[in-house]
Amino acid sequence: MEIFLAQKMGFCFGVRRTVDIALKMIQINQKKVITYGPIIHNEDLINYLKNNGIDYTLDIDKIDPNKVEKVIIRTHGVKKQIIENLKNKGVKIIDGTCPYVMRVHRIVEKLSKEKYPLLIIGNKDHPEIIGVIGYISDDIPYFVVKDLNETEELVKKGTFQKIKKLGIVTQTTEKIQKVKEIVNYLMDYIPEIRYFKTICYATDENQAAIRELAPKVDIVIVIGGKNSSNTVKLFEIAKNYCKRTYHIQNENDLKIEWFKKEDKVGITAGASTPDWIINKVIQKIREFDDIICNHEGREYEKVN
Ligand code: SF4
């Protein structure tokens, strides 16, 4: 078998930065450190951190300042109020929020001060959007829409009738085409729109790379957390081009019967998949290759 890696895959800049912060804590033997919520969508990494003394919590009330000195904020960021609550608790904050997400926080804070109602394009249940909403002032109306249909619904309900100006930001992983449709549509209804391009192209690059690789191989292995939306997206793209596409979390999910002798194997990984997991998957596929070649060789001898 031959193994081909997607030109771009695995950790994006923001995830790498936050994970490095946590790994550094282990390296310098810092005790009493936790993360606020799972640091990224990857169970193996969460377990690794836990086994090395860095657990997580989402319940600030349960944090005991005698046992916890530092709290790492995850890549997706959190509401401003959470930072305040943690400070009041007397713990030190290590902010692992991706700088691109921090920029969205700053923009909505500024627009709030300038009394702009806000439209956020994204998934209202995603931690990033929950965090962004937490930076909007209490007296400012805001709306979250996932697509053009939901925006049209708001217009039909007359939501924007009295709104003279509107600020628009997006989830960092949004698609530009969808955003353009929504902004263009709203231009007919709102006299003043301030749109900020807050899209990050890191996940797009991973998607473009698998789009290029998948049609050229016989089987694709997509590595990443089952609840990682960008990994699921990579799986969907690859499956369109290559029927034998499998989504695994780590090397233990691989099955030897998926592979055939002389297969071209394509590999990609979600933005929250650590390099060490990718390396273990490659190693295991190489072991399968040895087994399949020897095994098929023996069978061939028997037939003759
Ligand atoms: S995808 Fe972009 S915005 Fe999100 S964590 Fe990675 S670098 Fe930051």
Image: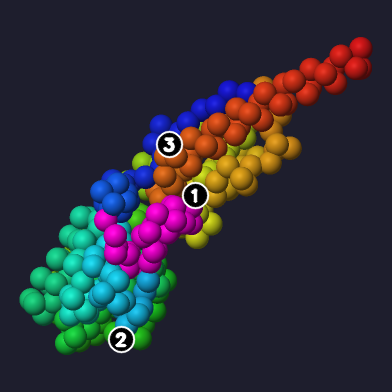
- Residue occupying image coordinates x 17% and y 70%: 108
The answer to whether the residue bearing label 3 lies less than 8 angstroms from the nearest atom of ligand 1 is no
In this picture, residue 303 sits left or right of residue 38:
right
Identify residue for label 2: 158
Region rendered in magenta? 30-56
Q: Nearer the viewer, residue 298 or 88?
A: 88
The answer to whether the residue bearing label 1 lies less than 8 angstroms from the nearest atom of ligand 1 is no
Question: Identity of the amino acid at label 1?
Answer: Gly
Q: CA distance from mark 2 to mark 3?
A: 42 Å
Identify residue for label 1: 224
Q: How is the image coloured?
A: rainbow
The answer to whether 131 is drawn above or below residue 288 in the figure is: below
* Crowd tier of the residue under label 1, counting other residues whose Cα lies within 10 Å: few below 14, some 14–19, many 20 or above: many
Decide whether residue 35 is among the magenta residues: yes
Q: Nearer the viewer, residue 281 or 227?
A: 281
Q: CA distance from mark 2 to mark 1?
A: 42 Å
Quadrant occupied by the N terminus: top right
